[in-house]
Amino acid sequence: MLVAGAIEKCIGCRLCSFYAGLLSQNLAGLNCSCVRIDYHADVDSFTLAIDPGSSLGKKDFEKIVKLCPRQCLEIAS
Amino acid sequence: MLKSGRILFVNTDSVQAEAKIQPELSDSIGGLAQAVALSSLYPQARFIFSLGPLTGFIPFCSFGCGYYFIESSWQSCYWGGLFPSALKMAGYDALVLSGESSGSFNLGISSQTVRFGADLVGDIFPQERYSSHMTYTGSQFVIDGRMVLSSKPAYALKKIGISRIFIQGDACVPVSDGEELCLIIEDLLGKTRLLATLPGQNHSCFLCPAGCEQADSVFSRHTSPLGSCLVACPLAQPIFNDNGLVFSCLRALGYSYNHDQITRVEKFVSSYL
């Protein structure tokens, strides 16, 4: 399972979200990914949400973790 | 092809919005060239926000070109963040604003609806979904709470009667070759060192890993004719000087521009830079 191990490092590039959309269904878009990054202006921080019904497997999650430029994400067993 | 030629026209005099398909714009590639073409087709336009073919899909290309009429001439500016990508994901290649209203309109844009109203955000577009907004604060336009629009484009926008633009990028776009696009993204991210800026801790533009100090900047000009059409980050010009890379990006997204078309548009745009 993909988790936000260091989400405090997130700068909101949304590469993880976009890339996950491409890996899952070859769909691009801000709303069609199983990985979602939301910005909360009141506390100036980001949160990560993963659709539990995602079709992505461990290899896909590894690619997403590797892609993240800030190493915000990790895989929890 | 991702570029649909779908243009959103909004007029504040008649308080009407209309989305039109404009296939005749396909030769203009996008960005500044597309904005110039639109200003010729619609002389009543006063502010054109034009996207590139790669906007929202390719790292370092999440910019948009603002082309506005002020002091009897057309001028341009460029900014990134999330605003241009949100407009692209709402299914539009450009937003054309016209009218001269003393009113104060809030404009809410999504893939299916355009609404005028006083309080759009909370009721119609829930804040927790991906979105971007530009808001007049009484003295300036602030984009996504951080980026400040320069005084001239802000004046042009205010003169139209716009106080807020809220965009919900709520469409899903099928990509013809997702695997190729993944490879291109990985390749481009390896070129981050070529950016004419240093990585920082700022909020990043969409699909950019840098988060540099200029991430919240509005650029008054673009130095590269092709970059101004793509619309690439001005700080990423060294990356997009590679024509082979540009064609790979275009091909992965289903565009079939050839070298002659690109050269023609570059020449056309050079006179505007």
Image (cartoon, rainbow, N blue to C red):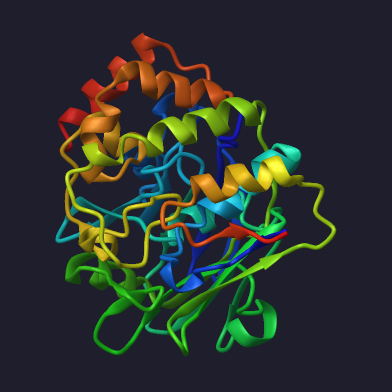
> Looking at the picture, how far across and down is residue B184, in whole percent?
48, 29
**Residue B17: image x %, image y %?**
59, 62
Q: Is residue A57 above or below residue B205?
A: above
User: Where residue B193 sits in the image (x, y, percent)?
Assistant: 24, 40
Q: Residue at x 66, y 79 (%)?
A: B126
Q: Is residue B64 above or below residue B37?
A: below
Q: Residue furthest front?
A: A77
Residue B259 drawn above or below residue B5: above
Asked whether, in this view, residue A26 is left or right of residue B50, the answer is: right
The foreground one among B241 and B203 is: B203
Residue at the spot 48% in from the left edge and 80% down from the top edge = B105
- Relative to B223, is B45 above or below? below
Q: In which quadrant is the C terminus of chain B drawn? A: top left
Front residue of this view, candidates A32 and B63: A32
- For residue B225, which quarter of the picture? top left
Asked if residue A27 can be seen in this view, the reply is: no
Question: Which residue corresponds to the image point at 33% horizontal and 87% vertical from the top-left?
Answer: B137
Is residue B254 at least partly visible in the picture? Answer: yes
Q: Viewed as shown, does residue B256 lie left or right of B115?
A: left
Residue at 68% from the left image edge and 86% from the top image edge:
B123
In the picture, measured across the screen, residue B156 lies left or right of residue A57, that is left
Q: Position of residue A53 (x, y in %)?
A: 85, 58
